[in-house]
Amino acid sequence: GASPRQGNASAGAVAARGRCPEGGSYQVYHLRQEQTLGVTYRGLDFQHERSKLITSPPFDFVLSPVWWCAGLCNDDEDCLTYTVHITPLGKGLGFAGDCYFHDHWLCDDGDIVLEKSLSSTSIFSAVCRQETDVKPGC
């Protein structure tokens, strides 16, 4: 049978891989700063309830859970944004992260942030894709 997505260009666009960086650098997020698709921010903590929670395996480097979560979000067409809370596992044991996926960003207040997290050095977020039906008041 034919795939329901076949011949539908817009459906193919929705399934496109996300645009979150899976390595490199990040920006420190400042209150009321515009959130840009494809930029990783330190201190940005999305308030919207999670659609999924995944805990990373341990990594040797502190930022590795961030890039791991980004890759998972990029591969999940329902993941628009992610937030990761990094936890040190103890001396010599590395770092793990709790990855919170969100299925809203510009709609349903998905872009609201937790101000208490702005100074955190262990919370990172990025926008991997946006809603296809974005319009004022969506």
Image (cartoon, helix red, strand yellow):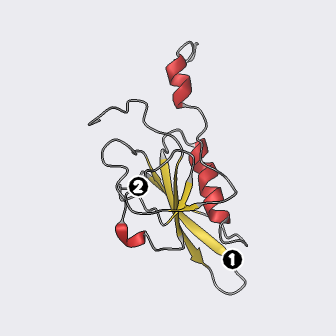
In the image, residue 69 lies at what x, y percent?
Answer: 59, 56
Point out which mark residue 109 bears. none
Q: Pointer 1: what residue? A: 94
Amino acid type, residue under disc 1 in the picture: Gly
Label 1 vs label 2: CA separation? 25 Å
* Foreground of the two, 98 or 116: 116
Q: Which image quadrant for residue 132? A: top left
Q: Is residue 99 visible?
A: no
Read off the residue under disc 2. 50
Q: Give residue 62's position: percent from left, percent from top.
A: 66, 72
| Among numbered discs 1 and 2, the one appearing first in the sequence | 2
Left or right: 87, with 67 as reference point: left
x, y percentage for residue 67?
65, 57
Residue at 42% of width from left, 70% of height from top?
117
Location of residue 108 (image quadrant): top left
Quadrant containing the N terminus is top right
Q: Residues within 10 Å of mark 2 (few under 14, many from 20)?
A: some
Which residue is at 37% across, 33% downward? Answer: 134
* Labels in figure, total: 2
Quarter of the picture holding the C terminus: top left
SS label for mark 2: loop
The secondary structure type at the circle numbered 1 is loop
Identify the residue at horizontal 41%, vertical 55% (top origin). Answer: 50
Q: Residue furthest left?
A: 137
